[in-house]
Amino acid sequence: MQKTNRNIAAKFANGETVFSVEFFPPKTEEGARQILRTANKLRSVSPDYVSITYGAGGSTRERTIEYGELLREIFNFEVLPHLTCFGHSKDEILAMLKRFDASGFRNVMALRGDPPKGESVFVPHPDGFAHASDLIAFTRKNFPNFGIGCAGYPEKHPESATLDEDIANLKKKIDAGADFIVTQLFFDNSHFFKFVEKCRACGIDNPIIAGLLPALSYKQVLNFKAMCSTDIPLQLLQKLEKSDEQDGAKIGLEWAHGQIDELKKSKVAGIHLYILNRAESALELAKVIRQ
């Protein structure tokens, strides 16, 4: 019998820190084994939900559904599948939402999406949506009972001129029907606290989930800095620069541990770990989140 997910938005009602992790659909046989091994290990820490990404231009959409179903059916996770505007007409998006619904999903992470690798400018489908807020409004209209997540950027989206402009765009997503916000990864909590303060000041009262990535190496964080314009604290950067691969993972884990301690003291609504389909850091950090 097919299982059906519940609306994730309800998980924020009791005031406890919601714990979640993100998977990405595998592209190889070894990647498939890896995601299943990781999911099996994570059963022991019982994430409140797991998300699964949607490739640029919908390049992994079939695997998003396939592995989303496996994560739910085999491991009994609540699943939040991603859906993006890029490359899709309104009819294609409606068809995907219907497939989510038929597969038992009752939540969606609604994103504008990024262009495929090698392209730098977002060009919407001629019969599609240009903004995540449009996708959210469309989803809310057609599937009013879905839980809808949207993205937030504590250090602003790279295409926004200012943080205030970016938060004004975020408010459009909330007004269109998004239930909760999951942030882009950050390594300096001060950016998150400033972001939350500005959100509250402009009338955004929805749960804001802090997105964290336990760093693995000096090279990795530099790549994220280049891709996302993420601020890397000098102390973390210097420690990673002097470390080898094994020590780098330990340093990243300790840094994330400190972030979580501070975030929990601030009564953060949720913590979302970008785990890159790896279990080790998530298992350790889950203990801190669940304390």
Image (cartoon, grey):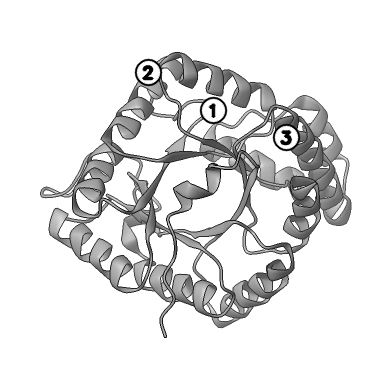
- Precedes in sequence: disc 1 or disc 3: 1
> SS class of the residue under badge 2?
helix
Relative to 30, residue 137 above or below: above
Crowding around mark 1 (Cα neighbors within 10 Å: few <14, some 14 to 19, many 20+) is many
Crowding around mark 3 (Cα neighbors within 10 Å: few <14, some 14 to 19, many 20+) is some
Q: Quadrant of the N terminus?
A: bottom left
Question: In the rendered structure, are the residues bearing label 2 and label 1 in contact, judged by CB atoms less than 8 Å apart?
Answer: no
Nearer the camera: disc 2 or disc 3: 3
Q: Position of residue 170 (x, y in %)?
A: 38, 29
Q: Nearer the viewer, residue 207 or 222?
A: 207
Q: Which residue is mark 2?
A: 165
Q: Which residue is mark 3?
A: 264
Q: Amino acid at mark 3?
A: Lys
Relative to 161, residue 40 above or below: below
Q: Which residue is mark 1?
A: 154
- Precedes in sequence: disc 2 or disc 1: 1
Q: Nearer the viewer, residue 273 or 141?
A: 141
